[in-house]
Image (spheres, rainbow, N blue to C red):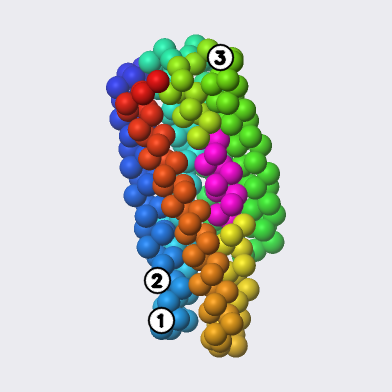
Amino acid sequence: MISTSIWAYFHILLFVFWLGTDVGVFTTAVFLKDPKQSYETRLTLMRLLSKIDILPRLCFALILPVGAQLTRGLEIYPITDAMLAATWVIGLGWSLFIYVLMRNEGKPLGNTLSRIQIVFEAVMGLLFIGIGGRALADGTPDLPGWYAAKILLYGCIFLIAILMHVLFKPFEQPFMEIGTQGSTPEREAIITRTINRALVAVLGLYATIAIIAFLGTVKPF
């Protein structure tokens, strides 16, 4: 039996790798919009960004079952064996889904999986926002305020992930056109605008993660 302190350690590690690797994605995206870089260099950066991006996604998925284990160990909420098993099935299945999606990016299967991912993230996001919001509003389920707020914000991360996907989508076509037809001010303007908007959403993600970490550490209410 793994002790609660070990689950807390894993929980911290997931936060560290989630935020740390996502900063790498952020930095790579900043260089990606630089028109002074050759297309070959930018293509390499794009591939690097895609590979790095799998790590924060996996941390996002695995923090669900690890968080459930920690919740049970700390007796914050009486999580049953069935509930715990469900979080592991979702977390591990989601991790496998992410890996398959990343391996098939740009292919018909990848496009289909990407649409499925958006639906999944929307459902999960609304579910956790609903649970956390109701717990804060009327105490159902009976959770500490700080923990209910964490659940609500965790749900918000799903919606931020969808927003990031939507904002980054217009990048693809002009970037491919630069590779085949060359750079133009119009194409570069779309790329810069698209990345800048996506990076604003990324900063929102960082702020949300930071607040979640603060709530879990300080437990202010």
* Residue 5 included in the magenta stretch of the image: no
* Residue ID at (50%, 39%): 61
The residue lying toward the viewer, choosing from 200 and 67, is: 200
The dot on residue 139 is 3
The answer to whether any part of residue 105 appears in the image is no
* Residue ID at (47%, 68%): 46
Answer with mark 3 or mark 1, whichever residue precedes in sequence.
1
Residue bearing mark 1: 37
Relative side of 7 to 122, left or right: left
* Separation (CA) of disc 3 from disc 2: 47 Å
**Residue 114: x percent and y percent?**
64, 53
* Residue ID at (69%, 61%): 108
Residue kind at label 1, given as amino acid type: Gln
Residue bearing mark 2: 31
Residue kind at label 3, given as amino acid type: Gly
Label count reads: 3
Secondary structure found at label 3: loop
Q: Main secondary structure of the magenta part?
A: helix
Q: Are marks 3 and 1 in contact (CB under 8 Å)?
A: no
The residue lying toward the viewer, choosing from 25 and 198, is: 198
Answer with mark 3 or mark 2, whichever residue precedes in sequence.
2
**Residue 164: x percent and y percent?**
55, 54
Q: How many residues crowd around disc 2 within 10 Å: few (fewer than 14), some, or many (20 or more)?
A: some
Q: Are marks 2 and 1 in contact (CB under 8 Å)?
A: yes
Q: Are marks 3 and 2 in contact (CB under 8 Å)?
A: no
Q: Which residues are magenta?
A: 154-165
Q: How many residues crowd around disc 3 within 10 Å: few (fewer than 14), some, or many (20 or more)?
A: some
Q: On screen, 170 above or below 162?
A: below
* Residue ID at (41%, 81%): 37
